[in-house]
Image (tube, rainbow, N blue to C red):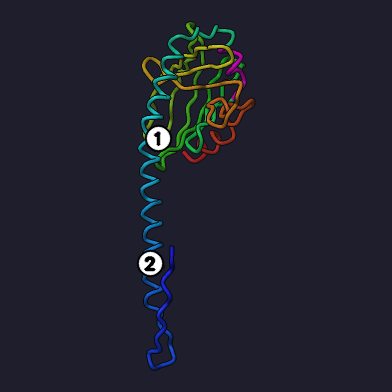
Amino acid sequence: MTHPKPAVRDDGRGVAQISLWSSFVKRVVGNCLGAAFACSVLVLAFQVPATAKTATKIAEQAQEATVVPDEGVYRIYQNHSWLWGKKGAGFFAVKQRQFDAWTHDKGRSGYGNGMWFIPGGGKLCYRAQWHGSWGVKGSMTCFEHRQVGKVIYKRKSPDGEWYVFKSSHRNRSDESMKLKYGDYVTRKMNRIKAKQ
């Protein structure tokens, strides 16, 4: 490819103008930006079906998996905090199966107290009274757990989407990375209580 020679003109004030060269640079930059945009659209187009395929594959694998025994569910959660990012956390204490949590979403904070239990069939449930600017409301939430080898799948019961909860690969997308041993709840929960 031959590059055009820049046409240099003096505008009478001692300022050199490079007209042909600047139009060439603009065209090259424009082509590069257009190609980059086209590539990003193409990547997104392939990523959406791949994500759907992955979710379908995980759901199929979870359906064929065996139910995690009650003892296994207990070992996963005992004295662990489930961190929900900046939106809160829940702590599953062994003592009296106490469940404590805090939540913060859309500028509203609250906390929950209750208990957690294992009703069988690979399920973990927690029942809590939630306190916040909305008042007090009770709720019960359950999750199912299934396992194939060292991979544990989880979903919100009764009809949430299955996802990889824990695996031997321990990649950063594992939900289990958000499950930490210890109480990461009480201090923040007490601060929220003090403000209400």
Instruction: Establish if 50 lies above or below 17.
Output: above
Residue placed furthest toward the front: 2
Could you tell me the amino acid type at mark 2?
Lys
Does residue 70 lie above or below 84 as drawn? Answer: above
Nearest the viewer among 178 and 6 is 6
Q: Is residue 84 found inside the magenta-colored segment of the image?
A: no
Q: Position of residue 158 (x, y in %)?
A: 38, 14
Instruction: Name the mark nearer the viewer: 1 or 2.
Output: 2
Amino acid at pointer 1: Gln
Instruction: In the rendered view, tell whether residue 17 sits above or below residue 174.
Output: below
How far from the left and from the top, in percent, is residue 34?
36, 54
**Residue 31 in the image: x percent, y percent?**
37, 58
What is the secondary structure assignment of the residue under circle 2? helix
Instruction: Point out the image quarter for the N terminus.
Output: bottom left
Q: Which residues are magenta?
A: 73-80
Secondary element at image label 1:
helix
Mark 2: few/some/many CA within 10 Å (<14, 14-19, 20+): few
- Using the rendered view, name the quadrant where residue 96 is placed: top right
